[in-house]
Each structure stands twice: as C-alpha cells, then as structure tokens.
Image (cartoon, rainbow, N blue to C red):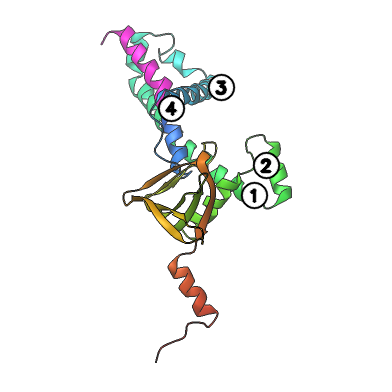
Amino acid sequence: MPPASLQAFTILILGIVPGFVAIRGYSRRRYRTVPDRDLYAIAGSAVVSAIWLGVVWLLLLKVGDPLRKWGVIPFEPAELENHRSEVALLGLAIVCVPFPLGSAGAILMNASEELWRWPRIWELVQKTGFFKPPTAWDLAWLKFTKVQKAGEVLVQMDDGLLVRGGYGTNSRADLSPNSPQLFLESGYGYRLDDDGEPAEVEGLGPAGVYLPGERINAVYFLPSKQSDADARVEDGSEGNQG
C-alpha cells in the first residue's frame, strides 16, 4: 500500500474506531438495545473519536511530542522505521483504551442516578456540569433490574392496548440519552371489555415484542411469583404442610 494511502486509511480508522469502541463500552453498561448502525452512529463515533484524539494529542505534547520524534507527524519513513514498536503500541492504546473509559463513564452515570437521593452530594455533582438528574424512566428500569432482575411487566399503550410480557436477560429498555424504547423477550397484546375483563387478544409475540416509547402511556412492574411466595410466607398466609 502506498504511503499516502496508508496515511489516509490510518486517519479513517482513528477517526471512527475509538469513538465506536467507547460508545460500545458505554452502552454495554447502560442496558441499551443493539447499537445503531446507520449514519447517525458513524457521526457519533466520529465526534467521540475527535474528542479522544484531541485529548491524546494534548497528553503527548505534555510528554515531549513523541509523534514528531517517531516520524509520524510529519511523516518521515526513516524515523518511523526505527520506532515501529512504539507507534504500534500507541495505536493499540488509542483504539482499545476508549472501551474501558466508556464503561467507566456508564458506571458513573449509573452511580449518579443513585446520588440524587442525597441532595447535598447531588448538588456538588451537578456543579461539575457532567451529570443530569435521572429521568423517571431511567429510575424505574434501574430499580426493577436491580431488585428483581427479571419478571413480568404490563404496558398500557396510547390507544388503550395492553401488552403483557416477560422482561429478562434478552430484553432491553433504552435509557437516556437515548429515546425510551422497550423490547420484551415475549408477550401478547389484548384489550378490555366494558366490564374491565380481557376481551380480545390482538397479537402474540413468543419471539419478542417491540414497543416504541412515544406510544407508551404507563408501565406496571409485576412482582415475580417467587416474590409473591416469599411475601405469603412472611405474613403467615402460607404455612408448612404436615
């Protein structure tokens, strides 16, 4: 590959991959759905990569501008030949480090959603300008997944349709800054008659049900059967047989 083509390829990779890796690390900790694969995702990756490369550039300038010494910028093949291992390690770090940084950012966001319970601490955190108060949607799903991890939910849609389904390890609820969306790994939709009883099943989703957030009116988190059994034992309504 000619040097000019190699430089262009390197710039393209460094302009997209670090940001994509950082976003992946962040999203894995934020219970999101499958990452976007359209131009919006590419643009987001490019923005994050630009910020990351700017930070790396500033750090390298602080330690003596090794890119110039190694013949990377400006490009000098003779110097670069003598520092191939250093350049390779730097490139690997630029591409790989964003993933744990993205994961750390998501952990901080999850932690910040608990800090709001302590007003004085939350006030100090807000002054940094990096965190915003969690939305009610975020808090609801974080609490549900933390306490119960899996179970049934009942979703009321804007047209009166009720969707009941299972939320488990293969389900997803998008949290901020994404728009609210919900995927249940199984479920079915139905409507109520005039007496408030289930009257008509409108759809079955044994392989999953997708629900756009803008059409959701309410979400009811149903206790698991195990939780119900534990509660009955604790209040004495269910005794030992014998």
Q: Residues at badges 4 and 1 in contact (C-beta under 8 Å)? A: no
Q: Quadrant of the C terminus?
A: bottom left
Q: State which mark lies toward you, 4 or 1.
A: 4
Tell me if mark 3 has few (under 14), some (14-19) or many (20+) residues whose alpha carbon lies within 10 angstroms of its own.
Answer: few
Question: Which residue, given by chain and number where applicable, does mark 2 sit on?
Answer: 125
Amino acid at pointer 2: Val
Where disc 3 sits, the SS reads helix
Residue at position x 49%, y 51% in the image? 155
Contact check, label 3 and label 2, Cβ < 8 Å: no
How far is disc 3 from disc 1 in space, using C-alphas? 35 Å
**In this rendering, the label closer to the viewer, 3 or 4:** 4
The secondary structure type at the circle numbered 2 is helix
Instruction: Determine which residue is flagged by label 3.
Output: 62
Residue 100 placement (x, y as % from top left): 45, 38
**Bounds of the magenta span?**
1-17
Amino acid at the residue labelled 3: Lys
- Residue picked out by circle 1: 115
Label 4 sits on residue: 41
What secondary structure is marked by label 1? helix
Give how far apart the Cα atoms at labels 4 and 1 are. Answer: 30 Å
- Which quarter of the picture shows residue 83? top left
The mark nearer the N terminus, 3 or 4, is 4
Dot in front, 2 or 4: 4
Q: Counting residues from the N terminus, which is met first, the one under dot 2 or under dot 4?
A: 4
